[in-house]
Image (cartoon, rainbow, N blue to C red):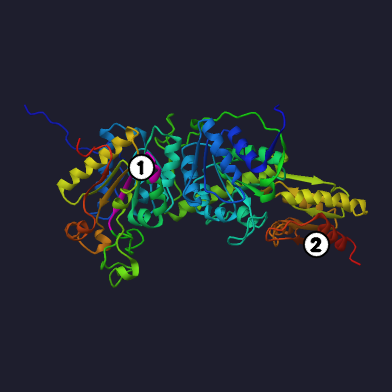
Amino acid sequence: MADKVLMKGNEVIGEAAVLAGCRYYFGYPITPQSELPAYLARRLPEVEGVFLQAESEVAAINMVYGAASAGARVMTSSSSPGVSLKQEGLSYIAGAEMPCVVVNVVRGGPGLGNISPAQSDYWQATRGGGHGDYRTLVLAPNSVQEMADMTIAAFELADRFRNPVLLLVDGILGQMMEPVQLPAPTTYDINQKPWALGNPNPRKGGRNLCSTIFLDVEQLEEHNWHLYQKYQVVTDEFAKGAYKHLAVETHAVDDAEIVLVGYGIISRILKTVVEKARKRGIKAGLVRPKTLWPFPSQVLADLAAKTKQFLVVEMSCGQMVEDVKLAVDGKKPVFFFGRTGGTVPSDFEILNEVDKLVRPD
Amino acid sequence: MMTMEQVFARPKSMSKTPFHYCPGCDHGVVHRLVGECLDELEVGDKAIGVAPVGCSVFAYDYFNFDFNQAAHGRAPAVATGIKRVRPDRIVFTYQGDGDLAAIGTAEIVHAANRGEKITVIFINNAIYGMTGGQMAPTTLVGMKTATSPYGRDAQLCGNPIKVSEMLATLEAPVYVTRVAVNTPANLMKAKKALKNAFRLQKEGKGFTFVEVVSICPTNWGKSPTDAHQWLAEKMLPVFPLGTYKDTLGVDKS
């Protein structure tokens, strides 16, 4: 194992991508993810890779589509307004079942919003985002170490399920520096995917085609159900614990009378809240979804039988809270506390909310 | 005794699928020229096509090699991704005027400006075909379409955009030419242009662009013969045939 190094979150995604065998990056400048393309612009030429600054996010995601269809491990990154522009390409990539990794270092919205950290792209990330019946896997790290580990996992999941995988990071994590242990590099060969365009190895059917058009309604229906079944396989595998280390983290939930739920940077604040609440005699626990789609519903459903209430905390007006409510299914009350517009809640104000819920008088 | 020799056959790089194009459409002719050129350059097995959105969305059906079907206007970006991963392949896009000169303007200009080592075939017939004959960026002033029922008004919608002339102002492209397939003589010139473009790509020289001024008998409301007549009389004065950029002098060689 390599020694720990001190790295910035945005940069570690770049290095982890290289270690995962990614040799192609296409992107367009936007704050607060600028360190990632800057890192890869330096790094990729060192490993005979291609860093290309595209004319727009629309072009960048379509370059990703082309490179993925040619068999490469490929990545793009952006921040909220830029990720909106990528939705056209993402719909095509998901429809054509091309693997790729897309990083969203989320900032405040809607519109141009601001460049401060936010979690208000949860719906866009977990509901497909673009047009049509499709899903993307969504991973949400909460530390620089996890940004490394989840980047590598994202490439593996993308190839495994032939699907785009999103890394949903907020601006704090992107800008944060922490010690990180980088894994050993993976070797990757662009000819290992038999379906890739330009693959010189003999293959069934004579030639390879990457397309999303099915004019015949029955064919498109069949294709959409095929995609649906794939998403069911993803959901089932996550539910059965095949990706336990990636799916969800729980903390002090066994005796918890109130379960806090949050992802990304919020989950680190919530951990402090749990400790402080317990010092005050409040039995608080924490559920942190690490994968946002598929959502770790079962863990929350199981806790609904044991705990008294849930408090979901997000840096948005309340988006993931809907998934928590679906999982809890009305069995226990689910409350929400959010700050939005680029504001990060303090442990103190969340603790106040916990206090109010547990001791209403 | 006389010996028989086959002098005309389907190009090897083309499939046996019948064209879905309207009778008289130029797409079939240009497809065939592409197939012939790739065969003659012996790169049919190394080609990767990128189909657009528009009438030629199913272009992949008519060729035997790998294809990507891109989103509207994005073919040059998709081709960039493919060519960067597989520089030894012959990568080309095949796009119409709505695709390339309207929604995909940024993608074509910047792929050309980067000097992507791809070939772009641009079918300019001054109208949107597949969606039902709407005004295109290359529609002539005064030309009636579904969305310019009183004729294209230059005050309201500007003038037809001249893509070859625009791209020729860039440093990187090595070959930018405009051809037509309305007469046998023009067809032979078009084939030479396409072959030049693919040869330059095979030699790794740079970005090549072949605009083909074409017809749309269905949406123009003309017979194929009348349409080709109209092309010669009305379109060619606005879109003059000729080579606009030829850095390596291939037209003369």
Q: x, y percentage for residue A139?
A: 66, 46
Direction from residue A187 to residue B211 in the image, left or right: left
Q: Residue at x 44, y 51 (%)?
A: B71
Per the image, is B116 magenta? yes
Q: Which residue is denoted by mark 1 in the rendering? A: B172
Q: Quadrant of the N terminus of chain A?
A: top right
Magenta-drawn segment: B113-125
Q: Quadrant of the C terminus of chain A?
A: bottom right
Q: x, y percentage for residue A359?
A: 90, 63
Depth order, front residue of A32/A242: A32
Direction from residue B58 to residue A25 in the image, left or right: right
Per the image, is A295 magenta? no
Depth order, front residue of A116/B132: A116
> Does residue B45 appear in this view?
yes
Q: x, y percentage for residue A61?
A: 50, 48
Q: Which residue is denoted by mark 2 in the rendering? A: A333
Mark 1 belongs to chain: B
